[in-house]
Image: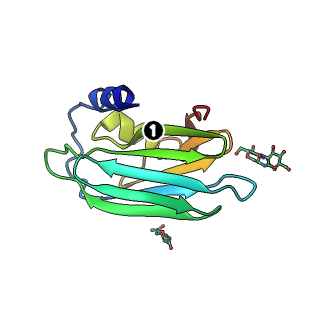
Amino acid sequence: MVSCLVFLVAACQAPITNSLLNHFTEHVINNLNNSSTLEAHCKSKDDDLGLRRLAAGTEFNWTFRVNFWSTTLFFCDLRWANGHKAFDVYCPDDQFLAKKCAYNFCRWSARDDGIYAFSEKKNHYVLAHKWDPK
Ligand SMILES: *[C@@H]1O[C@H](CO)[C@@H](O)[C@H](O)[C@H]1NC(C)=O
Ligand SMILES: *[C@@H]1O[C@H](CO)[C@@H](O)[C@H](O)[C@H]1NC(C)=O
Ligand SMILES: *[C@@H]1O[C@H](CO)[C@@H](O)[C@H](O)[C@H]1NC(C)=O
């Protein structure tokens, strides 16, 4: 777990060119079937957003300011009855943002078969992570 997050952080160190970004919103959405509850624990280096329990069909969102040097990094640990996953939800990297986010938001949709990200490039949700078994 710890080594995994260290790896994710390391994989995220890349220069950013879209410094026009200012406010950025993250959405974590429970789109699991069968009324499954989703637990989300999201953090950055400086902020711990606490453990959130999301009922089916609800979301948790937060907005933050992207600093000029863009060292902001957020990651979440999501878990439900059939799996869990820890992954970066905001990474100041153009490729990450183009593939997994839109111009000023990321939408992470937890579904039975994995976690989907809304890709601005594709204009629809794409499977970003499969669940690790519990
Ligand atoms: C959710 O319910 C459907 C229909 O009853 C079932 O096929 C499916 O296996 C259930 N999924 C989970 C994760 O329990
Ligand atoms: C953020 O989440 C709340 C529920 O927690 C919801 O009412 C609100 O519409 C969401 N905001 C956006 C911009 O989606
Ligand atoms: C449950 O979720 C999966 C993956 O999101 C979806 O393909 C399926 O149609 C959903 N419905 C049921 C009843 O399992």
Position of 6 relative to 61 (above/below): above
Residue 53 in the image: x percent, y percent? 53, 60
Residue 79 in the image: x percent, y percent? 55, 46
Mark 1 element type: strand
Residue 15 sits in which quadrant? top left
Left or right side of 20 for 86:
right
Q: Residue at x 28, y 44 (%)?
A: 73
Position of 90 relative to 134 (above/below): below
Residue position for label 1: 86
Q: Residue at x 43, y 51 (%)?
A: 41
Residue 127 in the image: x percent, y percent? 58, 37
The one of 84 and 65 positioned closer to us in this rendering: 84
- Count of labels in the image: 1
One can see residue 25 in this view:
no
The one of 99 and 2 positioned closer to us in this rendering: 2
Instruction: State the scheme by which the image is colored.
Output: rainbow
Quadrant position of the C terminus in the picture: top right
Left or right side of 42 for 47:
left
Quadrant position of the N terminus in the picture: top left
Residue 32 in the image: x percent, y percent? 67, 52
Position of 56 relative to 99 (above/below): below
One can see residue 39 in this view:
yes
Q: Residue at x 66, y 41 (%)?
A: 82
Position of 36 relative to 72 (above/below): below
Q: Residue at x 35, y 58 (%)?
A: 49
Left or right side of 71 for 79:
right
